[in-house]
Image: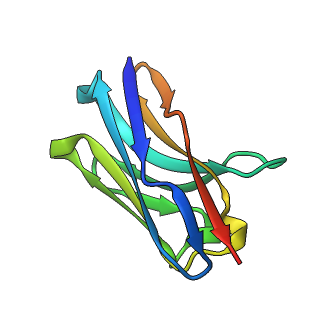
Amino acid sequence: QVQLVESGGGLVQAGGSLRLSCTASGSISSITRMAWYRQAPGKQRELMAGISSGGSINYGDSVKGRFTISRDNAKNSVYLQMNSLRPEDTAVYYCNVLNFFGSYWGQGTQVTVSS
């Protein structure tokens, strides 16, 4: 089992920035990938960015060039730096972790971008 605690969401004006954090505990030694997803009301959950244990990174098309994912293995944490935020970025953001046993989700953190 992996437990995830997210933080960093909030209300920001368009053009502003936020940094999300997610810290994992539990069966962390077998983590293969950490990622951020978001889900807006009435929409499917979509990938924002993922980073593998080897450091390979991929981004969703809607956030390329604006969002940056990073990982601190010593702290078992993954971060999402979000710049140039837009009202359409408003959503609940979820941390996701994959290990050899399965996929785990955080409780989500709300990000609201005002115009």
Q: Locate the C terminus and report the quarter of the image it occupies.
A: bottom right
Q: Quadrant of residue 112?
A: bottom right
Residue under the image location 29 percent in, 21 percent down: 27
Q: Residue furthest left?
A: 74
Nearer to the camera, 100 or 104: 104
What coloring was used for the rendering? rainbow
Look at 52% across and 78% down and name the residue there: 16
Q: Nearer the viewer, residue 103 or 26?
A: 26
Identify the residue shown where x is 42% and y is 42%.
Answer: 6
Task: Name the residue at 38% across, 17% down.
Answer: 1
Taking depth in this image into account, of 41 and 35 the one nearest to the observer is: 41
Q: Is residue 54 left or right of residue 81?
A: left
Q: Is residue 30 left or right of residue 112?
A: left
Residue 9 vs 75, above or below: the answer is below
Above-or-below relation of 23 to 114 = above
Q: Give the image location of residue 41, x and y in percent.
A: 79, 48
Name which quarter of the figure residue 76 lies in: top left
Tell me where residue 11 appears, x and y as whole percent: 57, 63
**Residue 98 placement (x, y as % from top left):** 43, 33
* Residue at the right extreme of this rendering: 42
Q: Is residue 61 left or right of residue 41?
A: left
Residue 62 rendering spot, x and y as whole percentages:
65, 69
Image mark count? 0
